[in-house]
Amino acid sequence: MILGKNFSNLKVILVEPNGPLNVGSVARLCSNFEVDELRIVSPKCDIFSLEAKKMALKGNKFLQNCKIFDDLQKAIADCDLVLASCGRIDVNKNSFFGSSEDIFEWTLSFNKINNLAILFGREDRGLTNSELLMANKTFNISTSQNNPSLNLSHAVSIALYELNKCSKRNFDQELKVFNLASSREVHDTFLEIEEMLLRVGYLLKHTSKVKISKFKHFIFRANTSMHEINVLRGIVHQINWFLNNSKRN
């Protein structure tokens, strides 16, 4: 299993949390499940407050040693695989979600993942569509349709419990070698693709983000490998070379 007896390669990432009680509770959960590291992007509260520390208890070391980032892309830069939790129902119609159980079982079908990240969004509105597109896979936790949004720390507890439960199952199939394109590789590739398509007039500035988002969905749903994304990037580099040199003639 990629996680073994503990989550020695798992990063729990909170995006703009605004409740110190939730942050403290999540730190405690990181201790409960032996998570590797807690990361926080642009916190909107005092994560080192007395309230947070009281809730953290034995998880206080995760508060003291947590890494704080001002940008989500930086927080996941060293992660091979990124999963995102989403409880919103007002997401883009092209978005694709799996159940937490299915996504975790798929994750555990790989022999080894050096760094795995799970993203959790803001208490009031979760992750934005652009932030969800930074994840290789997005999962939801089934709840009542009348009240689908879970408390932040509750969502983290369920996700870690289900991942822990899946990691202890015996899989009959031979574990696959992990070679998926990382979220960062996909992100960097599509920055170049967007710039190129703007240059040739295929995209317009005011609609480019929406169209590029659709392309990203295709890539993530196809489980694109590192080799495949490198081939795509090579094509883009060659087209850019042609565009730059053809202007000189």
Image (cartoon, rainbow, N blue to C red):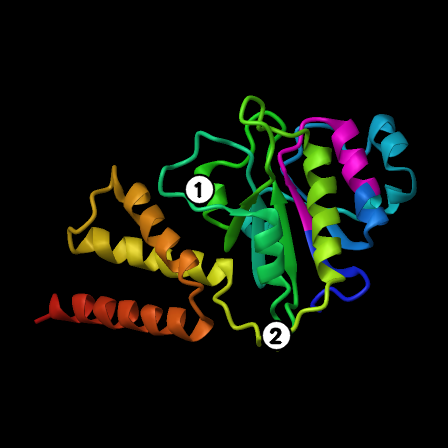
Task: Tell me the quarter of the image containing the C terminus.
Answer: bottom left
Disc 1: which residue = 130
Q: Which residues are magenta?
A: 12-28
Q: Which residue is more in the foreground, 159 or 46?
A: 159
Secondary structure at badge 2 equals loop
Where does residue 207 sit, x and y in percent of width and height? 25, 39
Task: Quadrant for residue 247, please give it.
Answer: bottom left
The amino acid on which the numbered mark 2 sits, given as a three-letter code, is Gln
In the image, 149: left or right of 67? left
- Res. 173 mark: 2
Is the residue 124 above or below the residue 235 in the image?
above
* Circle number at residue 91: none
Of residues 48 and 219, the one nearer the viewer is: 219
Q: Name the residue rendered at 69%, 67% in the picture.
A: 2
Which residue appears farthest toward the left when viewing the image?
Answer: 249
**Residue 11 percent coordinates (x, y):** 69, 53
Picture residue at 22% right of the left edge, 68% below the top = 239
When the figure is inspected, residue 165 is found, relative to residue 111, above or below; the finding is: above
Q: Which residue is the extreme one toward the top?
A: 146
Tell me: 182 left or right of 200.
Answer: right
Q: Is residue 92 in view?
A: yes
Whichever of callouts 2 and 1 sits on the residue coming sooner in the sequence is 1
Given the image, on which type of amino acid does mark 1 rest? Ser
Crowding at dot 2, Cα within 10 Å, few <14 / some 14-19 / many 20+, comes out as few
Q: Position of residue 5 (x, y in %)?
A: 82, 64
Residue beneath the point at 25% across and 37% down: 206
